[in-house]
Image: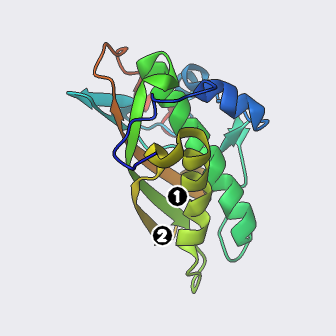
Amino acid sequence: MALDDTIATGRDMSIEEKIADLGLELPNLEAEYAQNKAGASFISHYAVGNVLYLSGTVPKKGGQPHLTGLLGQDLTVDQGYEAARYAALTSLSAAKFALGELDRIQRVLHVLGFVNSAPGFCDQPRVINGCTDLLVELFGAAGKPTRAAIGCQGLAANHSVEVVFTLLFDGGEIRAPLERDQAGRGQ
């Protein structure tokens, strides 16, 4: 499949079936937004034409933060790679909420990855590969995005990774975004 082909061609399994086949599951975005323990103020997604912008997401497993801490101090590159896979699943849950089904995604345009890094840690690209490798497993060549992998010192709630997706979709209807407000501030 050429890079400019959409993933809608020649698909044997739905994206959600592929996720399940990998032994993974999408987090519940609505439950996550209802909690809002961070006291953040933003919306889950926004579409301009057939481009869907998603807010940043972090690794969650079983509704709980997954693999928190600093890469190069608390976590290994392999653990960071896994954390990035779970952050990607959280982003995909936002896309599913917006679109109703993941098969409406035509291409992953861009991934911006932040890695909570100890001083001297410089393997951010290898960590964010966890996210992009999962996208390629699910979407084929259309899942390979443009990308940046940025080291930072500090992410909310000591998360190890945060990813931000920009997606191309079929242009059909989308759901109104979920909102987070500052109600959880200070909790």
Please tell me how crowded label 2 is: few (under 14), some (14-19), or many (20+) other residues with Cα within 10 Å: some
What amino acid type should be assigned to the residue bearing mark 2?
Cys
What amino acid type should be assigned to the residue bearing mark 1?
Leu
Residue situated in front as seen by the camera: 100 or 144: 144
Say above or below: 39 vs 69: above
User: In what element is the residue under mark 1?
Assistant: loop
> Residue at the location (51% across, 43% down)?
57
Residue at the extreme right of the image, as rendered:
23
CB atoms of marks 2 and 1 within 8 Å: yes
From the image, tell me which residue sits under label 1: 155
Residue situated in front as seen by the camera: 135 or 164: 135
Quadrant where the C terminus lies? top right
Give residue 88's position: percent from left, percent from top. 56, 44
Quadrant hosting residue 69? bottom right
Residue at the extreme left of the image, as rendered:
49
Q: In the visual, does 66 lie left or right of 50?
A: right
From the image, tell me which residue sits under label 2: 152
Give residue 155's position: percent from left, percent from top. 52, 58
